[in-house]
Every structure is written in structure tokens, then in C-alpha cells.
Image (tube, helix red, strand yellow):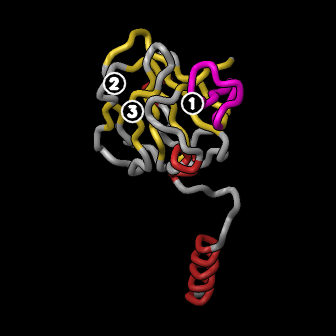
Amino acid sequence: MKYFFFLIGIVLFLNGCGTDNEQQTPAASAARVLEFPATVHFKTTPDSEEPLTSVRVAVAESNMARQQGLMNVYEMPEDAGMIFIFERQEPLSFWMANTPLSLDMVFANEDFEIVRIHQNTTPFSQQQYPSVAPALYVVEVHGGFTAAHDIQEGHFIEFVR
């Protein structure tokens, strides 16, 4: 009889150690998946015919959407990002709490001019990333994206829904 309980214990133990594709880690189960219904073009001048590059973007224009941002987004296509649209232009500051991807943060003013870029931000960091100058828009893309596409402060964004 004691061997029976011993065998049951081993079976239960081994069953718990197995890999079950339906089990997820807490991080994976909390992961958010975004849609990218709009586009941001990065341009050297507001009148540039051809953009330097473009990304598909999720749009955060409500308080709740702006607060969530890219928190708990563990995967995002290389040609995708998020645009934050604020109600008024002012100095802004972002951080990376609960954000697992390294990002480039592109701050743009009401004229769509890029006033500040923070590159390769640290995931899950409490560090503040300020716009320094007043901004109305923030575009977040994968870390290293702006350097790879030669996007610089003084360039422009164009937002298309």
C-alpha cells in the first residue's frame, strides 16, 4: 500500500514538471496585443515628398490609453510603434515602468517638429525621460530605430489615420 502512495506521488510530481503548452507565465498571461490602425511618417522637412521611414502605430489619445502606453507589450513588429496624442502642448516626461521593450521616444511639438529623442531606453526603469521643450505628440518605436533610420531632432513627423 505504501508503494501505491509513493507511485501516485511520483506521477503527480512528474505531471507537474511536464511542459504544458497551455500554461503561461504571469508575464505572458498579462501580455497585451495591440492593433496598429494609423501611420507615422518620419520626414526631414514638413514638405518632404518621401519620408525617411514610416511605422504603423497604435494610437493613445485617452488618459487611460496614454497611461497604459506600451506597458506589458512583450512583442511588437519592427515596423510598429505607438503615438501618444495629448490635449495641449507642454513639457512631457515618460518612464518605462512595466514596459519590457527597449524603446526610442520621439517627442514632437504642435508643428510636428521633433524636439527631443531618447534612444534605447531601459526596460522596467523608473528613470524619467523628459521632452525638455513643450510637446504635443510622443512616438515610441523599438530601441535603436531612430539611429538606424537617421531620424534626428529638428526632423518632423506626419500622422495619418
Q: Which residue is label 3 attached to?
A: 116
For the N terminus, the quadrant is bottom right
* Magenta span contains residue 45: yes
Q: Amino acid at mark 1?
A: Thr
For the C terminus, the quadrant is top right
Look at the magenta stretch and give its main secondary structure.
Answer: loop
Q: Amino acid at mark 2?
A: Leu
Mark 3 Cα shell of 10 Å, populated few (<14), some (14-19), many (≥20): many
Label 1 vs label 3: CA separation? Answer: 15 Å
Q: Which residues are magenta?
A: 34-52
Residue 15 appears in which quarter of the rendering? Answer: bottom right
Q: Amino acid at mark 3?
A: Arg
Residue 30 in sight from this viewpoint: no
Vertical placement of 72 versus 13: above or below? above
* Magenta span contains residue 35: yes
Mark 2 Cα shell of 10 Å, populated few (<14), some (14-19), many (≥20): some
